[in-house]
Amino acid sequence: MKTFPKVRSIHACAVLLIAAIFSSPVWAAPMHPRKGISHTYPEKYEDWEDAFPAGNGKMGIMVFGNPLNETVIYNNRGFNLAKTRDRTFNEVPQETREKIKQLCAEEKFQQANQLAVESSGWQGGGEGNRHPGFKMTIHIPEDGEISNYGRECDFETGEIFVKWTDNRGKWIRKSFVSRKDNVIVQEIAAPEKAKLICTIKLSIDPAMFFPEGMKFTSSCTDSFLTMKAIYPDGTNNAGYEGVTYYKITGGRHTIDNHVLKVVDADSVLLLTRTKRYDSQCEQHFQRNLLQKELLGIKSDYALLLSGQKATYGTIYNRVVLDLGATDQQRSLSNEALLAMQKDSGKSVTALWERVFDAGRCYYLSSSSERTPPDLLGIWTGDCNAGWGGYYHLDANLNLQVSGGNIGNMPEAMEGYFNLLETWKDDFRINARKLLGCRGLLSCGNSPGLSSGLMANINDYYPYHYKTGEMAWLLYSFWEHYLISGDVDFLRQRLYPMLREMGDFYDDFLTLKDADGHSIFAGSISPENQPVNVRASLLNNSNYDIAGARFILTSLIEAVRILDIDEGADKWTGMLKKLPPYRINDDGALQEWAWPGLQDNYGHRHSSRLMMIWPYRAITPENNPILFEAARQTLLKKDEHQYEDAGHGLLHAALIAAGLKNADSVNDKLLRLTREGFYYNSLASAHYVDGKVFCTDVCHSVPTIMMEMLVASSPGVLELLPAVPEGLKTGTLKGVKGRNRLTVEKMSWDLTQNTIKCTLKSDIDQPIVLIQRSGIETISTSARVFDSPLGPIGRVMQLPKGQSVTVYLTINRSGQK
C-alpha cells in the first residue's frame, strides 16, 4: 500500500484525498536509459559534424563510427592558431570620451559612433581560430557483409560504442574521455570468432584546412604513436603534440613507416593525451612528458571507466527528465526521431527527452574546472570555425552555461567562474583605457584564457560601450549564490566584482537627462540598430539599463547579507536614478529607452527583454504593466524568424518561459528540433539546415526545458509555468531552485489535471508557491498560510533538510 508523509496540519484530509489521486504509474515509473543511437556514420571526412563527440572539458574526440575504416578527431581546449601579435588599443583621452558622451546626449549618434571607433585605435590580434589537432585512422580488413550496425553514446558515462557484425562475429569498439584521469581511452576488441587484425596511424586530413607553413610529424615506436605540430613562423615557435600509448593483449605488432600494424590480438587499448605549448615547443617535445604521464596511468579500460562513472556520472545523473515517451520510440535512432519530428507539428517526446539528455552530456563533456564550453563546445573538425569558435560574451557563452546552476553541475560552472576571474585584469584595462572608468568592462569575444582584451571595435561594433555585457556574465555568479547560499563564495569571489562594477557605474553615468535620470551615453544593444538610425552607438539600451539594475540591486543585497557598512546609500541612489524603461506605440518595450529610436523586431537578439530572462526582475506580481509590455514585445518578435539563428530562438524561448507563454516556448522548441539545428549526433548547428557547427543549441535546450517546468526566485516557486500542451505527462528530478530548494521529484499528469512535487530546502524558510496556469488547489503536509501576493499563491513553511511533498490540482478550463 502507498504511504504518505505524516500530516501535522488542518490540511490532513485534503492531503490524503489528493494523495489518493496521485497513486499513478507516472510517479512510480523508472527512468529510461539515456543514450544516443545512430544507424549511420559520416562516410567522408568533410561530414565531421555528424561524428559522436566526447570530452572532459580539456580534451575531446569526435568518433565517426565507420566500422572498418574508423576516423577519430582529437581536440584540445588550447588548440587555437598561435598569435603573431596581441590585441591593442589606445588610452582614449578624457576630452575625447566626454565629447563622445556629449554627442550621444545631443543625438548626434553617427558622429559619436565614428569618434568612438577612430579614437580607440583598436587593432586585432591574439590567438586565432579554434582548430582540430589531428586524426587517428583505424583500418580493419573486410570479411563478409556488415550487419547490425549501430553507433551509441551512453550519456550517463560519455562512452561511445561502435557495433557491427560480419563473418567474424560481433564487434564492439569503445571510447570515452576520462574526467577523473584526464585521458582519452579507446579499446578495440576482437569478435568472438576471430582475432583482431588492424592498422592504426595518426595523421592530418587535407579537409582540416590548416594554414600554410604549419609543420607536422607523425611517428610510431614500440609503445607510442605521436603527432607533433609546429605553428608557422612568427609565432614564437608555438606548437602542440598528441601522444597515444598502446597496449596490445595477445598477438603481435609491427611498425611500417610509422603505421602500427596489429595481428592476431585479443584487444588493443589506446590511451591519449594532447598538449599545446605557447613557445619553444620543440624543447617540450624532447622532454617526453606526455609519454611519462601515460605510463603512470593504469592501462585497464574497466578501471578507468569506473573512475569516469564516479566523477562524470555522479554529476550527470543529478538531474533526470522523463516525458513519458514509449519504449518503442525510445528504441529508435536519432535520425529516425529527427525525421519524425520534422514531419510532425507536435512534440516527439522521445526526441525531446533525448536532446535534453544529450545536451547535458555535451555541456558537461566540454566543461572543466578551468574553462566552460566555447562556440564549439570543445570540438571541431577543421580550422574554419564560425566566428573563430571563440567565447562570445553577449549571448552565446551566457546561454551555453545557463543550465549549469539549476541543472546542479557546480563542477562544470567552476570553469566558467575561473574563466571570468582570469580575465579580470584585462577587463580592468578595457574599462580604464577605453572609458576612463574604474571597474570591469567585458571584451565582446575571446579565444580563451589567454586574453580578455577588447575585441571588434569598428563602425558596426563600437563595443567598448556595451556595458551590460559584464552584468550578464556576472549573473551566473549571483545565481550560484542564490542556489547554494554559499556566503564565502559571495564574499570572496562575487562581491569584489560587484563592488568594482559599482565604481564603474559611478564613473560612467555622469550625464543626466531633464528628469534627473542618468544617461547611458553611449549604449549598445548587441548587433542591432534602430530602423531609423544607422548607428550602433546610441543612448539607454535596455540591455545596458537592465544590466546596471541587476548589478546595483545585487550589490545592495550583497552589502546587506555580508553586513558591510559600505556604500549602500550610494548604490541605492544610483539605482533610483537609472532611466525607466519605455513603452512604445505598439504597447511593447522599446529597445532603447530614448525618444525617437524606432524598434527592429525582426532581429535575432532579444536584448530588450533581459529584465525577464535572465534577471527575472519583472513579474506579473511586481510590475504588471511592464510585464504586459514585455509580453507584447515577445508577440511582436515572434512574428519574425529570429534570422534562423539558434541563439536567437534559445534566448527568446527562455524569455517566453519567463513570460509564462507555453505556446511560444513550444513553437521555438519545435523549430529547434524540426529545422535542422541538430546533427545525427545530436550536437548542433548555429543556423537551420545544419549550417555552421555550434553547441549553443544542444547545450541550452535543457535549460529551456527546466525553466518551462520549474520557475524559481528567492522565496518563490512556480511549477509548470510554461509547459507545452503536448507534454501531458512527465517527471523531473533534481533541479535546483534560486531559493535553496531542490525539486527532488516532480511528476505531472495533465490528463488527470494533477501535479505532485517533493521539495527539500537547505534552510528553514517560507516559500510562496504560485497558483497560476489553472492550479486550483494546493495541499501539503507543510504548514500553509495566505501569501502576501494575494490569491496568486500560497505560502509553505519548509523545514530545513526535510522532504516535503506538495499535491496540486488543475482546472484547465479556468486558467489564470
Image (cartoon, grey):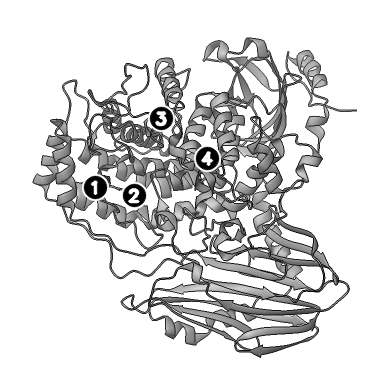
**Which mark is drawn over residue 611?**
3
Q: Residue at x 72, y 32 (%)?
A: 730
**Which amino acid does the dot numbered 1 rest on?**
Arg
**Alpha carbon separation for disc pair 1 and 4:** 29 Å
Q: Are marks 1 and 3 in contact (CB under 8 Å)?
A: no
Mark 4, residue position: 485
**Which mark is drawn over residue 444?**
2
Pick the front one: 546 or 47: 47
**Alpha carbon separation for disc pair 4 and 2:** 30 Å
Disc nearest the viewer among 3 and 4: 3
**Which amino acid does the dot numbered 4 rest on?**
Gly
Mark 1, residue position: 438
Q: Residue at x 12, y 30 (%)?
A: 106
Specify the quadrant of the image occupied by residue 20.
top right
Specify the quadrant of the image occupied by residue 267.
bottom right
| Residue 331 spot, x, y in % from top left | 78, 46
Left or right of residue 250, residue 573 in this image? left
Label 1 or label 2, whichever comes before in sequence order: 1
> Looking at the picture, does residue 204 appear above or below residue 734?
below
Q: Are marks 3 and 2 in contact (CB under 8 Å)?
A: no
Label 1 or label 3, whichever comes before in sequence order: 1
Label 3 or label 4, whichever comes before in sequence order: 4
